[in-house]
Image: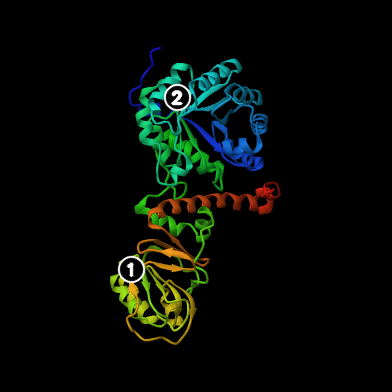
Amino acid sequence: MTLRTKETPTIEETRKITLQVALDFVVMDRALKVAREAVAGGIDWLEVGTPLLKAEGFDAVRALRKEFPGHTIVADTKTMDAGRIEFEAAAKAGADVAVVMGAASESTIRECIETGRNYGIKVAVDLLNVDDFVGRARQAEAWGADIVYLHCPIDDQMKGLNPFDKLRALAPEVGIPVSVAGGINSETVVDAAEAGARIIIAGGAIAKAADAKAATADIKRAAQTGVRKATTLYKRVGEDQIRDALIAASTANISDGNHRLPVLEGILPLVPGARIAGPAVTVRTAPGDWSKPVLAIDQARPGDVIVIDAGGVPPTVWGELATLSAIQKGIAGVVVNGTVRDSDGIRSLGFAVFTKGVCSRAGEPKGLGEIGAPLRISGVLIVQGDWIVADSDGVLVLPRSKAAEMANRGMDCLEAENRIRQEITSGNTTLGQVQELLRWEKNR
């Protein structure tokens, strides 16, 4: 079989886009609410995401088919085995498209394709984690697949990865539609269209939006016109944008997104509402010895956060004059495992000091301790250059090597909470009801 190849798509071609929303929920009612808003915003295809399919089974497909009889319903089955059984079940439940993994065996993929023919549904082959994704896509087309998916998984997105380079390599190599998923928003949808995708799957940018109707309309308009609409959400940062993400997300978001990351216990802001994010300059000193904390100001760079371990007890190692010096250097803030003084003066300056307590009695500048040494506060290791993020809920430490990923996971939680907040207020309901907590309590 000779496969048709394509040249780089024209502007007119890039505007012929099918927009699909991935309903990656575990609660059917929440998925239906987003689906209704997305349909009102002009969505083309509705996807029963894999989490929803696992939580609700093919009843999720039936529910969408019943409410949206005129829309294409995709069952993201991610089939790896038993292709005939799963695709037959998807078809009978009302799906128009079902998904088999490109990493599955040839026999499984062929069985899905044959079952799709028998039951009248399209077969999409997901190339997730397939090394030779171009070769597998060509094979899938030759075997009779209808669509190939190029999918950047959520956990890779958290590391700042995206699917667009692979998409540019794949799109000219097959004649069947290429679908893309992973980090699609009202800006990147233009990249996806220009790179050759014909089916573009938006997940969180619609499903987590407070107004899914408006979000859908914005993304679809950008895809059709090629004009991006700027957004601060639903995008993932690299090393050079860590600070922006950490300031946008709360420490609660970041903790939730990183397996309940612990705070430095008992260290809270002296100035109400203070927020900081920056690389750590570490200082180990004895209680009351303020020599090394003050000298650290001279070594710190603008945007750094000085972290002082003074044993968590008085006498004090930081005050108003040190604060004035830090402001002159452009330092982002100070974290003190110990006490500070001149609290009224520091508050009037509005400088972000986080401390375990306040004490008027200072010690002597004896010069004990060290700048740049690793610290351990509340059992948390802090190495110079690790990222510090702090707000009214406390202080978190993000290891430098994972800071971008951890910031992205915090943003992911922030985005999800935006949607939940809207559902609580618009539905005059409670968090427990929105999340169906009784159903999802641990049963063992």
| Disc 2 + disc 1, Cβ < 8 Å | no
Image coordinates of residue 360 in percent, x first then y, are 45, 86
| Residue 406 versus residue 378 in the image, above or below | above
Cα–Cα span, label 2 and label 1:
55 Å
- Horizontally, residue 215 falls left or right of residue 300, namely right
Local packing at callout 2 (Cα closer than 10 Å; few below 14, some 14-19, many 20+) is: some
Occupied quadrant, residue 168 = top left
Amino acid on which the number 2 mark rests in the picture: Pro
Q: Is residue 396 above or below residue 38?
A: below
Outermost residue to the top:
1
Q: Nearer the viewer, residue 191 or 325?
A: 325
- Residue 154, x across and y down, in percent: 48, 42
Q: Which image quadrant for residue 289? A: bottom left
- Above or below, 118 against 170 in this view is above
Q: Residues within 10 Å of mark 1 (few under 14, many from 20)?
A: some
| Residue at mark 1 | 372
The scheme the figure's colours follow is rainbow
Q: Position of residue 85 (x, y in %)?
A: 62, 23
Mark 2 or mark 1: which is in front? 1
- On the rendered image, what quadrant is the N terminus found in? top left
Task: Label 1, secondary structure: give it.
Answer: loop
The residue depicted at 48 percent of the width and 72 percent of the height is 269
Task: Look at the numbered disc 2 and give the secondary structure of its residue.
Answer: loop
Question: What's the residue at 60%, 50% (across, down)?
Answer: 420
Q: Read off the residue under disc 2.
A: 177
Type of the residue with mark 1: Gly
* Mark identifier at residue 67: none
Q: Can the viewer see residue 43?
A: yes
Q: Earlier in the sequence, mark 2 or mark 1?
A: 2
Q: Is residue 194 visible?
A: no
